[in-house]
Amino acid sequence: MAPRRWSIARRLFALQLLFVVVGVAVGGAWSWSSARADLEERAADRSTAVAVSIARNPFVVEQASTSDPSARLEPYALDLMRRTQTDFITIMAPDRTRWTHPDRAEIGRPFRGTITPALRGETFTETFAGTLGPSVRAVTPITDQDGTVVGLVAAGVTVANISTALVPRLVSVVVLALAIVAVSALFSWLLSRYLGRVTGGRGPEELARVFASYEGVLHSVHEGLVVIDRSGAVVLHNDRAAELLHLPPPAERQEPIPLAEVDLPEGLRTLLASGDRAVDETHETADRVLVVNQELAFPRGSAKPLGTVATIRDRTEVLHLSGELAATRTLTDALRSQTHEFANRMHAVVALMELGRVDEAIRFASDELDRHADAGAPGVGVRPDGGGPLTATAQVLAAVLNGKRAQAHERGVVLGADTSGLRGAVSAPASDVITVLGNLVDNAVDAVAEHAGGPEGPRVQVTVATLDDGHTRITVEDNGPGIADVGAAYERGWSTKPSGPEGRGIGLDLVRSTLAAVGGTMTVDTGLTGSTFVVDLDARQVVA
């Protein structure tokens, strides 16, 4: 197993610490070099001043012309050395013979160093290793009144003493450098801890892989994904979320998008901004029915949430399929009821014929045919006013009502249907109309079947008509006990009946979702004497 690479935080800490140490080392070396050059320059200036002052002293000029210059110049030079804090003062003859020296054994010996510029009458400085070691010295000529060089003066400070003078400054530089390294290391450590917490201790390679994985998931997942920070702004979303919530494409905008700027229904915007947990909440937009799940997002090892993550599913297609399934189930149930009823009638006809009562069997069958013909009018393919055939949607609607009438009859409920006011096309697809009508009729039949209904017995009345503005209005009335809480009745899972194997409480929720998809509205009037559901389908959604 390969060793784990350093995290970004650790790499940054090491890089910053190395940078600070190298910077301090370079700065310290430069400071040392600069201070040394400064001290050498100051020593050269002081040595020059001392040498020139000695060379111009009349006493020195006078003694240089005597037969024994050392006798009086030696004490003078030693005293001057003490007073000027120079390491040596050497007064010599033009031929380098020393007249004075801190070491008396060197008197009379030749001077070591350069004197040629001084013999030409120039004053100069140099660094030279003499009898006392390397030193910074100044050499100047001693001239008489005629300008003749009668001697030379060399004054200087040893390099060792210059280095000794640098020690206090070096200590200051080292202390300052250590302080800078310590403070920088502390800040680097704090920054590395913060980065380690933010990045989860991952290295750049790991973060690159994670980022690539997240990008792949965001662009490939079919559900909409939205990340919202604590300020209520969308900080991340994928392509599907941009499509469902009308957000800008992820590649076009990088900064957070406040929810107040997003065109969303107020309920959905409130949910996303609240940060509350949500499980399969249904929200309707202008053109879609969305199912939203939302959870708080916590950083690793922290109890403080960073924000929320919401997943959004488009339920419009599922709703359409559910509507088609409900319509198919409604038609199937209607056929089953009619088949059951027809089988009973056929058994009666067969029994009469077996008993030899053929006339009664023929009369019974004729009455049933007349009754079903009357029950099927006016919606089984021909308009009651003779205006021509009904549209396909109207024919299916009439068939459904016939089937529902048979189902209601089995449960002792009288179902009346009036489609005489239906003119032109029904303003919704047939499957959606069946979903709305079937669920409302089923709920009404259930409500009155479990109660005695009014004095006339349990009854349900369905009216389908076309209004003057082109809307199609469906009215379902019953004489049941009414609905105690209309608002709760719209919630998925709410029901006044015990739950069966397929669940309860989805009828009105399915109706509401279907109406949102096709552009319709529903109002409810309920009381102790019954309930009335009125559905208006938008005329702009006309489908034959």
Image (cartoon, rainbow, N blue to C red):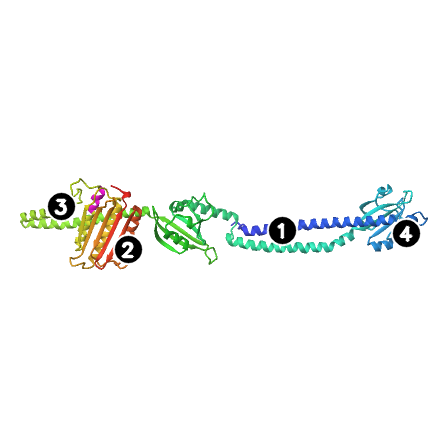
Name of the residue lying farthest toward the top: 388
Dot label at residue 509: none
Q: Which amino acid does label 4 sit on?
A: Leu
Q: Mark 3 points at which residue?
A: 373
Question: Horizontal placement of 359 versus 264: left or right?
Answer: left
Residue segment shown in magenta? 392-399
Please provide percent x and percent y for residue 97. Answer: 89, 47
Q: Which of marks 2 and 4 is nearer the N terminus?
A: 4
From the top left corner, tell me how far across and down residue 357 is, in percent: 4, 49
Left or right position of 374 against 429 = left
Seen from the viewer's position, the closer of residues 340 and 80 is 80
Counting every numbered tag in the picture gives 4
Contact? badges 2 and 4 (CB < 8 Å): no
Q: Contact, CB < 8 Å: mark 3 with mark 2?
A: no
Q: Disc 1 designates what residue? A: 20
Dot 1 or dot 3, earlier in sequence:
1
Can you tell which of label 1 and label 3 is closer to the viewer?
Answer: 3
Q: How far apart are marks 2 and 4 (CA)?
A: 125 Å
Crowdedness of circle 2 by 10 Å Cα count: few (<14), some, many (20+)? Answer: some
At numbered mark 4, what does the secondary structure look like: helix, strand or loop? Answer: helix
Q: Which of marks 4 and 1 is in front?
A: 4
Q: Amino acid type of disc 1?
A: Val
Residue 69 in the figure: left or right of residue 33: right
Q: Do the residues labelled 4 and 1 touch (CB within 8 Å)?
A: no
Query: Marks 3 and 2, how far apart in space?
Result: 36 Å
Query: What is the magenta segment's predominant secondary structure?
Result: helix
Q: What element carries label 3?
A: helix
Q: Mark 2: which amino acid?
A: Gly
Report, in whole angstroms, how far the alpha carbon at label 4 lies from the one at label 1.
56 Å
Name the quarter where the C terminus is drawn: top left
Question: Which amino acid does the dot numbered 3 rest on?
Answer: Ala
